Amino acid sequence: MSAFDLSEDQQDCLQELINVAMGQASDQLARYLNTFVYLKVPSIEQVKSDQLFDSGHQNLEAIAVVSQGFFGYEGIRGEALLMYQPQDSHRLADLLGYEDDEMSFDEQIIDLSSILTTTFLNVFASQIDNQMSYSAPRLISANQGMVSEHLTQQAFNWDLALKVRISYQVTDYSFNCDMVLLIPEEAIINIKTVIDRILEDF
Amino acid sequence: MLDEFCLDISNRLNTGILFLDCDYNIIMWNRFLEVHANKNDNDVIGKSVFSIFPELPRKWFERKLSSVIQLKTQSFCGWEQRHHLFELFHSRPITTDSHFMAQNCTFLPVEISGELEGICILIEDVTDVCHYQNQLNKALEELALSNRIDGLTQTFNRKHWEECLAKEFSRARRHQHDLALVMLDLDHFKLLNDTFGHQGGDLVLVETAKAVTKLLRMGDLFGRYGGEEFAVILPNTNLAGAEEVAERIRQSIAKNTIRYQDRTISVTASIGVATIDSIDTRYEDLISNADIALYEAKAKGRNRVCLAKETLLA
């Protein structure tokens, strides 16, 4: 077991924090989007950075990725990647409440990503008495074939990635998107410290 | 004293700070905005942001701010999606082609002891970034294009054309679709070069490419295979269909008279046609089948179309 692996207790605690964060975030989202948003319990898995894009994404070419950095106190920081299958992304403008011609597709997924990431991480941060700041979200590439190329070319500085899969379902249509939180090694140690403190208090 | 210092710093920042209340009235802005918007402080404070900046897309802006207010979370607007929100002047009007400042805007909820007081908009000048990124994109596009195109005839070059063939070949294989290949070679081109000079020869290549291009459908892939040899990939086309296309190409080239230095150049082409066959396992086999048919067309007296025969494939 490396210094970056989570113990079973730590893993459970993190899952709980994320579940609560997701629950509150989806509640806020539903009110903002003025529609019924149904979120499944997010699945969380730890992925080694070099395996991140190996499994579950046979169809990587078809994905648009939006990246947004986050950073809080106590060295909690990382990068959130939101991954979309383009076929799921029709009518996003409808969902977000914009007129059809008001926003390009790129802008829609950037907007949605930013909302998903920040609402989720804000709640997550407040649970651990922290506060997050965010960099501007960036579309890495929506061009088919470019994303996997881009991602595999990056020499990752990340040892462990926390992959949180969220499924969004809205009453009259549904789409899926994956939120992947990439957390560099020092930040993992910092998260473990925070989790340990919560476990002690418990 | 610290307040004074903060005010001073905010006025020295090279970032615009615009503070709105929840009804979109301007409560405060910093010097950066005052200067770049070229408006007087007194005419701005207390006014609606839409009256001071009428260029704002109002519905979009209100929806954007409503997410900040309701979710109490920050929101962004980047130059890549919207070049600018506010029509502000910038510091490189001469050396860039941007009329207004390219902007990255951040919308922050301002909470005072848990109550939302308003929204702070940070406006960064990214005209530089935008300018260099656009130049880079343009250069990359040109590079990608010149990497695919034959400089003389403006058709696909051999390398790109062959990549296309490899793709179409495996696609046709996978979906069991038809795929045809037409290879054409201009007749007696060396003689033509000797008679009219290389510039005359070049013109014939250019004009021939134009004539062929006119006959092709969307999805057909036309490239210069070598010297005076061209090739057309015809996806979803069987042998009969490809023969028809080849025959039209042959006639069009034969009818095409090219004016060069007050003289008329006529040229004909020999054409070989092949289609994908269960025996072909590599796209190169398709090329050699078309090549054999082309050779046959030459041997039978040129200016004609020959089809690859099943027997030749065995």
Image (cartoon, rainbow, N blue to C red):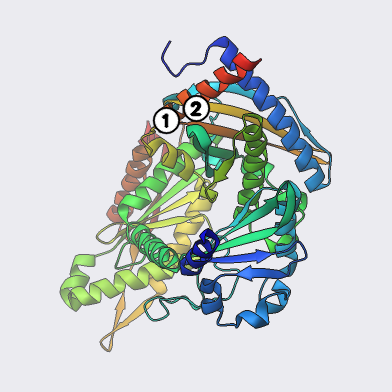
On what subunit does the disc labeled 2 rest? A
* Amino acid tagged 2: Ala
Depth check, front residue: B143 or B63: B63
Number of the label disc, if any, that sits on residue A140 = none
Identify the residue at the far front of this view: B1
Residue drawn at x 59%, y 82% is B39
Residue drawn where x is 65% and y is 82% of the image = B42
Q: Position of residue B295 (x, y in %)?
A: 29, 50
- Identify the element where label 1 is drawn: loop
Residue B190 picture location, percent across and down: 19, 66
Dot 1 crowding, Cα within 10 Å, few <14, some 14–19, many 20+? some
Q: Is there any visible trace of residue B138 in the rendered image?
A: yes
Residue shown at the point (29%, 55%) measured from the top left: B298
Chain letter of disc 1?
A
Classify residue A36 by image quadrant. Answer: top right
As drawn, B100 above or below A100? below
Vertical position of residue B80 compared to residue A61: above or below: below
Residue behind mark 1 = A158
According to the image, label 2 marks what residue?
Answer: A161
Spatial distance from mark 2 to mark 1, Cα to Cα? 7 Å
Determine the secondary structure under disc 2. strand
Q: Is B173 on the left or on the right of A86, as rendered?
A: left
Q: Which amino acid does the dot numbered 1 rest on?
A: Trp
Tell me if label 2 and label 1 are in contact, CB under 8 Å: yes
Which residue occupies the extreme left position in the image? B194
Same chain check for tags 2 and 1: yes
